[in-house]
């Protein structure tokens, strides 16, 4: 039995409750939230909404700070790097309330030189230390080359994490990115299994699983072999609409699991 969740961009509780109600009726165990600025949301309200439907929040996504506000840990501007750290710290505060992990994906930013890499190393260590004090784990996500220019493969990201020497930083792997970057999805999962703490699924076209050509049966075979017991969270382009994406994802997973 896998714990399945679904990623939604958090806007307000009305929408959260609407989607959470559908998810819970379909057998989802969690809802993953993409939050631009946790300073602008009420953790109690979110907690109330998700507990009504008996859902967990396995992880909080932080990428909207990058895509919508241009904020990153690798920025040349100290002011922007400071804001990125502040955002991640406030995500950690919220994650503590919701018993979630915090995702570092696009918010790491692009790097063009050693200085950029060093900014991310130093700041990520600080953020992880803060997470450790709060009992919150952080996830670093390999993302494909068309969205960010480094840490594209699981191997590179794994080595980067090991090099940092942190205890509470693990891998979030995403089938959409793996389909582009990994030489073999199954062998990458197998090789780096000890740090895989969270999984995003989407098909090759970023639509719901079953809408493209990723071999999910093969992926689930390897997840079963490594006894993966974390969440599997669908992170999709929600077309034709979010209700259909939520429904079709579970329908497809039920048909192959
Ligand atoms: C974030 O989890 C991700 O996978 C990126 O593609 C952001 O869009
Ligand atoms: Mn992802």
Image (cartoon, grey):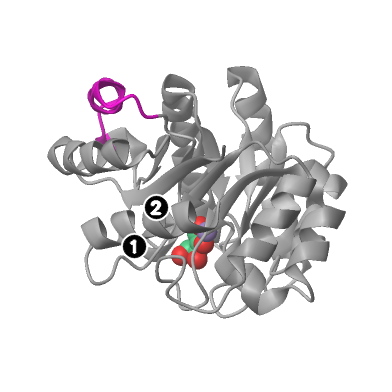
Q: Which residues are magenta?
A: 40-55
Instruction: Report x, y in % for residue 243.
Output: 22, 56
113 and 207: which one is in front? Answer: 207
Residue 43: say if magenta: yes
Q: Quadrant of residue 54?
A: top left
How many numbered circles does the render carry? 2
State the quadrant of the N terminus.
top right
Some atom of ligand 2 lies within 8 Å of the CB belonging to the residue at label 2: no
- Residue located farthest toward the front when viewing the structure as drawn: 255
Q: Which tag, 1 or 2, sits closer to the chain's start?
A: 1
Q: Main secondary structure of the magenta part?
A: helix
- Residue located farthest toward the left when viewing the structure as drawn: 14
Residue 175: say if magenta: no
User: Which residue is at 53% across, 58% downward?
Assistant: 256
Q: Quadrant of residue 237?
A: bottom left
99 and 211: which one is in front? Answer: 211
Judging from the image, what secondary structure is the residue with disc 1 in? loop
- Say which residue label 1 marks: 68
Kindly report the distance in space between the C-alpha atoms of the residues bearing marks 1 and 2.
Answer: 29 Å
Question: Is residue 244 shown left or right of residue 122?
Answer: left
User: Which residue is at 86% across, 48% downward?
Assistant: 163
Can residue 19 be seen?
yes
Question: Is residue 191 shown left or right of residue 134?
Answer: right
User: Which residue is at 46% across, 78% downward?
Assistant: 205
Some atom of ligand 1 lies within 8 Å of the CB belonging to the residue at label 1: no
User: Which residue is at 34% across, 43% downward?
Assistant: 37
Instruction: Report x, y in % for residue 9.
Output: 31, 51
Can residue 119 be seen?
no
Q: Quadrant of residue 227?
A: top right
Q: In the rendered structure, find residue 250 and report the number of the disc placed on it.
A: 2
């Amino acid at each position: 039995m896998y714990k399945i969740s679904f990623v939604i961009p958090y806007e307000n509780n009305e929408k959260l409750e609407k989607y959470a109600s559908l998810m819970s009726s379909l057998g989802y165990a969690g809802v993953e939230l993409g939050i631009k600025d946790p300073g602008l949301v009420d953790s109690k309200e979110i907690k109330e909404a998700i507990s009504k439907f008996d859902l967990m929040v396995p992880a909080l996504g932080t990428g909207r700070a990058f895509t919508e506000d241009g904020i990153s840990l690798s920025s040349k501007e100290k002011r922007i790097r400071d804001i990125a750290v502040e955002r991640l710290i406030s995500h950690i505060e919220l994650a503590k309330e919701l018993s979630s992990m915090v995702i570092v994906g696009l918010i790491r930013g692009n790097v063009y030189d050693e200085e950029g890499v060093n900014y991310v190393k130093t700041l990520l260590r600080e953020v992880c230390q803060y997470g450790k004090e709060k009992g919150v784990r952080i996830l670093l996500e390999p993302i494909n080359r068309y969205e960010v220019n480094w840490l594209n493969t699981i191997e590179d990201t794994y080595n980067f994490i090991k090099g940092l020497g942190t205890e509470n930083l693990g891998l979030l792997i995403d089938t959409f990115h793996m389909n582009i970057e990994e030489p073999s999805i199954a062998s990458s999962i197998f090789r780096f299994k000890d740090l895989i703490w969270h999984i995003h699924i989407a098909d090759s076209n970023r639509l719901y699983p079953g809408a493209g050509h990723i071999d999910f049966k093969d992926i689930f075979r390897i997840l079963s072999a490594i006894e993966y017991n974390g969440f599997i969270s669908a992170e999709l382009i929600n077309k034709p609409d979010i209700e259909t994406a939520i429904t079709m994802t579970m329908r497809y997973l039920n048909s192959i699991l």
